[in-house]
Image (tube, rainbow, N blue to C red):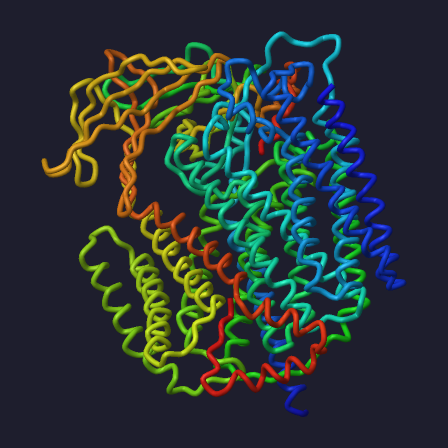
Amino acid sequence: MVPELGHLSLAFAGTLSLAACLTGFVGARLDHRQLQGSTVSLTVGQFVFALLAFASLVWSFVSDDFSVAYVADHSNTILPWHFKASAAWGGHEGSFLLWILFMSTWMVVLASRRKHYPASLFSNVMAVMSLLNLGFICFALFTSNPFERLIPLTPADGGDLNPQLQDFGFIVHPPLLYLGYVGLSVPFAFAIAAMLEKKVDAAWARWSRTWANMAWAFLTVGIALGSWWAYYELGWGGWWFWDPVENASFMPWLAATALIHSLAVTEKRGTFRSWTLLLAITAFSLSLLGAFIVRSGVLTSVHAFAVDPERGSYILVFLALVVGGSLTLYAMRATNQWVDVTFSVLSREFFILINNLILVVALAAVMWGTLAPIGYEATTGEHYSIGKPFFDLFFVPLMMTLAVALALVPVLNWKKTRRHNLQPVATWLAGAAFVIGLGSWFIVDAMMVSVAAAIALALWVILGHLYDVARRLNKKASMPRAYIGMTVAHMGFAISLMGVAVTATLSTEEDVRMAPQETRTLGYAEVTFLGVIPVEGPNYTAQEGIFVISTDGTSTFELRPQKRRYASGNVMTEASINPGLLSDTYISLGEPLEGGAWAVRLHFKPLVRWVWLGALLMALGGGFATLDRRYRRLREREQVNNAAKDKSLEGSSLGSSGAEATS
Amino acid sequence: MNRKRKSRLYLALFLVVAVGGTTAALMLALDENINMFYAPDAVASGEAPTGRVIRAGGMVEEGSVVRASDSLDVSFVLSDRAGSQFSVSYAGILPDLFREGQGIIVEGQLTADGIFAAHEVLAKHDENYMSPELLEMADESGQDRQREINFGS
C-alpha cells in the first residue's frame, strides 16, 4: 500500500511539473499574473508529492517491506534502523528519487523568495526547473522505479547494504553532494530565463550569484565528505583516487568554481556576460554528465551500456537535449551581449580571468582523463586506464599558479590597481612566505622543492588575506559578509593546498608482517602489536587487532582496527585512526598469516585533516557570502531601478580604495 | 587598428596559445601515463611490453598462491582458463576479495624473465561486481556472466 502511494505521488509530481512548466512559460510570455501565481502553487505541489514519494520509500525500508524489489536488494532485517533509512539512497533508484526530492526542494526555496525577482523572469526560471524536474521524474518512473514489487515471489529477508555504505559518512555524503549537483540547476535556469528574456545584465548576475554560491558550497562539502569517507572507510588510507566517480563530481565543481568568480565580474563590472552564461550551462551540464557516467554503467564497461541501454540512452538523450537546447539558445542570444569594459593587467577582472582559465584547463584535463578511456574502449574494444601521474602532471603546476594569482587578490582593485598598493604583499609578505618555505625545506629532509614551494605559496595567500583584513581593521573600513566569505574561502584553499602537498608526499606508509608482541617504528612512534580478539557486531563478526602506539614514551594510545565479515558474506577492512590536527596515525589489518602473525598496514599521515578542513572553510566562506546584506537591499531597489542605472551608481561608490569583495 | 581591436587580438592570441598548449600537454601526458590492459594470452605470448607500467588480469589459479614465511612477499599465477597463464610477484597486502579462483587485475611491470612484478593488486569491489575487462574475458571463455553490474553511487 505504502509503496503504491509513493509511486502514485511520484506520478503526481511529474504531472504537476509538466503543468508548472506550461503555466510558467506561457505565464511569462503573456505576463499573466494568475498563470504565474499558479506556477508557484504547482511548484509547492511538486515538492509535497516528491517528499511523499521519498517518505514512502524510507518507510518501506524501515518497515522491512521486502516485497519492494529495491528494498529487498539493499536492506535486511538485522540492519540497524538508521542504516535502513539511509539505504534509501544506497542504490541507483533511490538515489535518483533523492535527486528529485532535492530538485523540488530548491524550487520551493526559490519560490519562497519570488518577491525579490521580476515576475516574468521568475516564471521562466520556474518553468525551466520544472521541465528539468519532469525529465528526472520520467527517468525514475520509466527506467528506474524504486517502488517495483516482487509479488508473489517476496523474499523472507533482503540482501544487504554494501558494508562500506553502512557508515555515518554515507548517511551524509550523498545528500550534500546531490544538493550541490541539483543546486547548479538554479544558476542554469536563471541563465536560460535571462536569455529568453534577452536581459543578461548585472542584475541577473546578482540574482544567480547567491544560488550559485550556495550550490557550490554544498558541492564542496559533499566532495570533501566523500573523500573523508573513502579515507577511513575503504580501509587503505587514500583520500583521492582520480576514480571516474570522483572525477564526475569534481568536474562540475571546477566549472562551478569558475562560475562563482565570473559571476562576480559580471555583477560588479557588467562584463564577461557570455562567458558567465556559458559557465552556468557547463556547470549544470557537467553535473548531468556526472549522473550519466555514474548511473549508465559506461564506467563498468561500454558493453554494460549495450546490455542495459535503457537508462543510459535516456540520460544520454536528456543530456543531449539539455546541452543542445541551451547551447542553441546561447548561440542565438548571447553573441550580441558583448560589452566593452576596459581593464588593466593589474585588476581583479584580469586575475579572475586567470582563475577561470586555470580552472577550465584543469577541467579539460580531468574530463579528458575520465572520458578518454571510455571513448577508446568504445572505438577499439581495447582497455586502458589513466592513473594518478597524468592528473598530477596538470594539477601540481596549475594549482600553484592559481595560488600565485590568489595571493594578490585582496589588494587588487577593480579596473586597475596602482603598483604601490601591491608593494607590501609582493615584497615583504612574499619574502616572509618564501623564508618559511625555504626553512621547512631545510628542516624536513624528505621534503621536495615543489612541496616547499606549495607551502610558501599557501602561506603567501594566507598572509596576503590577513594583511588586508588587518589593513581594513586599522582603517576602520567596512567588512561586508561577502568580503569575509571570500577571505575565509581563499584561506581554505591555501590550507587544502598545504594539506594535499604535505600528506601526498610526506606520509609514511608501510605494509608489514607483525607477530604478536612485535614492535615497529612508524614515523616518530613505536607500534606494538598485542594480538587479535574476536568481536561481535549487530550484523557482522570481526577480528580486532590491538595495537599500542607510544611516542617518545610521553603519550601512548591504543588503536583497534577490525577485519569484519558481514552476515551477507562481505568482508571489510575497518581501519582504526588516531586523528590529529597535525597528523593521523592509521592502522588497518590485512590478512592473517602463519603463526598468529598478521599483514598490517601502518600509516603516518601528516596534515591529512587539512585537506578537508580547507574544503570546509571554502564551503563556509561560500555560504557566508550568500548572507551579504547588499543582496537584500539591492534586490529591492532593483525592482524599481533598471540595471544600467544601478551599475553606474555602483561604479561611483567603488571609489579609490575600491577593494570590494569578490566572493 | 584601434585599441579595442588590439586588446581583442591579444585576448584571441592568448586563448589560442592556452588551448593549443593544453591540448599538446594532454596528448603528451596521455602518451606517457596510460596503462594498457593485457589478457593472459597477450602476456604469455610476449605481446605485452616489458619495462613499462601496464595492467593485466586473469583468474587466480587454484593452489598457486605462495606467501613467504618472513615477509609480505607473495606470488601467484593468473590464467584465462583457456591455457594461457603467467606468474605474478607482489609485496604487500592483498585486497579483501582476493581469492583463489577469482578474477583480479594487477598493475605493474613485466620483467624480462616473464614474471609480472605488480605494485598494485585490484580485486572486485564487492561480491556482485566484476571488472569489465575480466567480464569480457569470462564471456569469451564461455563462463557465466557474474550477476548484474553494480551501479555504485
Q: Quick one: quadrant of the N terminus of chain A? A: top right
* Left or right: where A472 falls relative to A293: left
* Residue at image coords 86%, 58%: A27
Image position of A412 with respect to B72: above or below? below
In the current view of this chain or complex, which residue is farthest to the left?
A553
Q: For the image shown, how many numbered marks are present on the structure?
A: 0
Looking at the picture, tell me which residue is in the foreground, A633 or A473: A633
x and y, in percent, of residue A212 in the image: 60, 58
* Residue at image coords 18%, 26%: A528
Q: Say whether residue B111 is visible.
A: no
Residue A575 position by quadrant: top left
* Left or right: where A145 falls relative to B16: right
Q: Say whether residue A607 is visible.
A: yes
x and y, in percent, of residue A347 in the image: 50, 80
Image position of B101 with respect to A584: above or below? above
x and y, in percent, of residue A44 in the image: 73, 45
Looking at the picture, tell me which residue is in the foreground, A164 or A174: A174
* Left or right: where A479 falls relative to A339: left
In the current view of this chain or complex, which residue is farthest to the bottom?
B2
* Residue at image coords 73%, 36%: A49
x and y, in percent, of residue A651 in the image: 58, 84
Image position of A558 with respect to A176: above or below? above
Looking at the picture, tell me which residue is in the foreground, A422 or B26: A422
